[in-house]
Image (cartoon, rainbow, N blue to C red):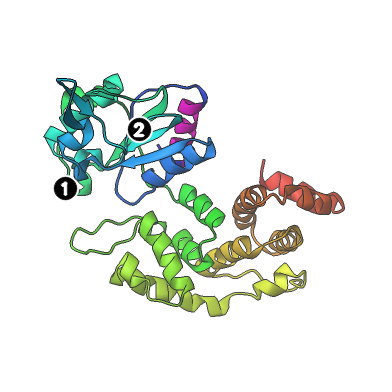
């Protein structure tokens, strides 16, 4: 499934209160952990991220303490004791078999030793696959059978929606729209390689005027900087967003077209700028590029709460409204 589908599935588990232990598989750096944390936050749930690979079996079960002549296991403080939330066992298959075995009782019976997980908590886990060249242990069959299993794949559209919502620099999005195969390209011979996680770091580095090679690797960074040279061929996006784009041609080179469409989407910060961007795109761009812009722009408009203001502007321009509706049917 795609990251967006994972988010919907986890949302369904919470809405229907299905306390099924859930294992999420996928390559490193694609946002599995972030999706889990965001889903918990969206529902107002507490979130505990537990890395079993950093614990010993006694850390999870607790320590034996003599109480009135009887040995009792005192559970650790990091396990939840009240309320509702998500207990997330991240990178579970990095833990050695002994630690995974200790987790079996917690995952199936929602208890370990004398500790009992409160009723309001979900148990979800995540891990990388062997084919991702991660240093993982095989998950024992009895433990695997205690989970439902979800496999997540890299998806540029899901990444783009997230990146636009988070305000990534437009150059990163435009480059990846042109070269989506570089969104995730594992290179076991290099310590830095491109993934959704490393592109988020690259966005921060580029905004600060620093070299993105530290995040995505030298060869990918070289391609990225070569792409940035194309920005000199962009039409004046600020002029377009202020309603003065009449007569400015839509670029002919595909790479520059991606830069123009993504740049307008990222920079349209209010309903007026969105309206002017739509007017220019629909008047000057081929239908497939206008549709690409319309789909992405309307997602951003909804996420930023600008839909009512945009509708008011479009109500006064019936022709433009009809053309946008036709593009997004």
- The residue tagged with tag 2: helix, strand or loop? strand
Location of residue 291 with respect to 111 vertically, above or below:
below
Residue 195 appearing in the image? yes
Image coordinates for residue 182, horizontal then vertical, percent: 36, 59
Q: Which disc number belongs to residue 135?
A: 1
Asked which quadrant contains residue 250, the reply is bottom right
Q: Is residue 243 left or right of residue 254?
A: right
Residue at screen point 21% across, 64% down: 190
Region in magenta: 4-14
| Quadrant of image for the C terminus | top right
Image coordinates for residue 86, horizontal then vertical, percent: 40, 34
Location of residue 329 with respect to 67 vertically, above or below:
below
Image coordinates for residue 265, horizontal then vertical, percent: 61, 60
Can you identify the residue that label 2 sits on?
Answer: 124
Q: What kind of secondary structure does the magenta stretch mostly adopt?
A: helix
Q: Residues within 10 Å of mark 1 (few under 14, many from 20)?
A: few
Question: Which of 282 and 203 lies nearest the eye of the viewer?
Answer: 203
Q: Are marks 2 and 1 in contact (CB under 8 Å)?
A: no
Location of residue 267 with respect to 131 vertically, above or below:
below
Question: Which of 55 and 239 lies nearest the eye of the viewer?
Answer: 55
Q: Is residue 297 left or right of residue 82?
A: right
Image coordinates for residue 204, horizontal then vertical, percent: 45, 67
Q: Earlier in the sequence, mark 2 or mark 1?
A: 2
Residue at screen point 79% across, 48% down: 311
* Mark 2 or mark 1, whichever is nearer to me: 2
Asked which quadrant contains residue 215, the reply is bottom left
């Amino acid at each position: 499934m795609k990251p967006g589908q994972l988010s919907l599935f986890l949302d369904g588990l919470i809405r229907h209160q299905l306390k099924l232990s859930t294992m999420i598989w996928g390559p490193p750096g694609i946002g599995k952990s972030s999706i889990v944390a965001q889903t918990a936050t969206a529902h107002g749930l507490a979130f505990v991220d537990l890395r079993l690979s950093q614990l010993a079996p006694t850390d999870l079960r607790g320590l034996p303490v003599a109480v009135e002549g009887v040995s009792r296991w005192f559970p650790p403080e990091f396990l939840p004791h009240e309320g509702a939330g998500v207990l997330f066992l991240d990178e579970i298959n990095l833990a050695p078999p002994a630690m995974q075995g200790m987790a079996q009782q917690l995952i199936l019976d929602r208890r370990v030793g004398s500790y009992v997980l409160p009723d309001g908590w979900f148990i979800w886990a995540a891990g990388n696959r062997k084919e991702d060249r991660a240093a993982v242990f095989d998950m024992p069959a009895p433990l695997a059978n205690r989970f439902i299993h979800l496999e997540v794949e890299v998806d540029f559209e899901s990444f783009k929606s997230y990146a636009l919502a988070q305000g990534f620099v437009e150059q990163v999005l435009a480059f990846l729209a042109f070269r989506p195969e570089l969104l995730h390209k594992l290179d076991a011979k290099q310590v830095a390689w491109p993934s959704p996680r490393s592109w988020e770091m690259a966005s921060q580095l580029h905004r600060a005027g620093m070299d993105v090679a530290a995040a995505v690797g030298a060869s990918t960074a070289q391609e990225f900087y070569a792409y940035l040279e194309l920005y000199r061929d962009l039409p004046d996006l600020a002029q377009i967003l202020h309603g003065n784009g009449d007569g400015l041609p839509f670029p002919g080179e595909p790479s520059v077209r991606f830069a123009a469409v993504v740049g307008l989407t990222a920079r349209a910060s209010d309903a007026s700028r969105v309206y002017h961007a739509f007017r220019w795109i629909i008047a000057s761009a081929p239908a497939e590029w206008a549709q690409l812009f319309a789909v992405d722009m309307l997602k951003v408009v909804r996420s930023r709460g600008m839909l009512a203001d945009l509708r008011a502007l479009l109500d006064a321009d019936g022709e433009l409204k009809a053309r946008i509706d036709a593009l997004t049917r």
